[in-house]
Amino acid sequence: MSQENVEIVERYFGAAVGALDAYWDSPRSMAQALVGHDLDGDSRQVLDLMHPDMRWKNAAGIVFEGKHGCARGFDELMETSQAYSATVTEVTDLADDRVLAVLTVEMKGQSSGAAATVSIYSVLSLRDGLIADADEYLNRTEALKAVGLEE
């Protein structure tokens, strides 16, 4: 199951990167597209890989619940950015249906114009072959500590 979970997370983030690219080619609300059944292929795949009870806590500590809530979270992130891109640099099985994904995110603030590059450490929990929880951290130690793998 662990290799299967890694593959699910790789597909999820591969589609998420594609959804980001599609957004910047033609900016629009993912939440509205979800309600209107008008999602691009990558956005559809991201949402299809989410458990219906998906819970996402972003690196700022804001929690979004359900597929529609996560789509709104994506919209809020894009609204605060002039530019935002992500590259997946690592996907590692943590056992117990958890996977660590490390992303390099490049962004530019909407109002400040300030550019930043950060690493995001996302701990994902899978249930029924779908991503049920995603908790983001700004460093590896904090992420591993949160799942009991570091003290």
Image (cartoon, rainbow, N blue to C red):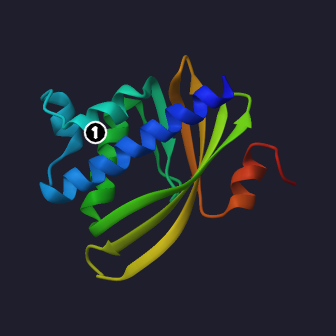
Q: Residue at x 27, y 38 (%)?
A: 43
Locate residue 80, reporting x and y percent. 29, 65
Q: Is residue 141 above or below residue 94?
A: below
In the image, is 122 to the left or to the right of 30?
Answer: right
Residue at the disc numbered 1: 42
Image quarter hosting the N terminus: top right
Task: Report the number of numbered marks.
Answer: 1
Q: Residue furthest right?
A: 151
Locate residue 147, reporting x and y percent. 75, 43
Pick the front one: 41 or 30:
41
Q: Residue at x 44, y 59 (%)?
A: 87
Q: Residue furthest top?
A: 128
Pick the front one: 88 or 108:
88
Q: Is residue 64 above or below residue 119?
A: above
Q: Is residue 88 above or below residue 113?
A: above
Q: Amino acid at mark 1?
A: Asp
In the image, is 138 to the left or to the right of 106?
Answer: right
Query: In which quarter of the view is residue 134 placed?
Result: top right
How many neighbours does mark 1 have within 10 angstroms: few (below 14), some (14-19), or many (20 or more)?
many
Q: Residue at x 20, y 51 (%)?
A: 22
Locate residue 52, reporting x and y percent. 42, 22
Tag 1's secondary structure? Answer: helix
Q: Residue at x 35, y 63 (%)?
A: 85
Locate residue 65, reporting x and y percent. 43, 34
Image quarter hosting the C terminus: bottom right
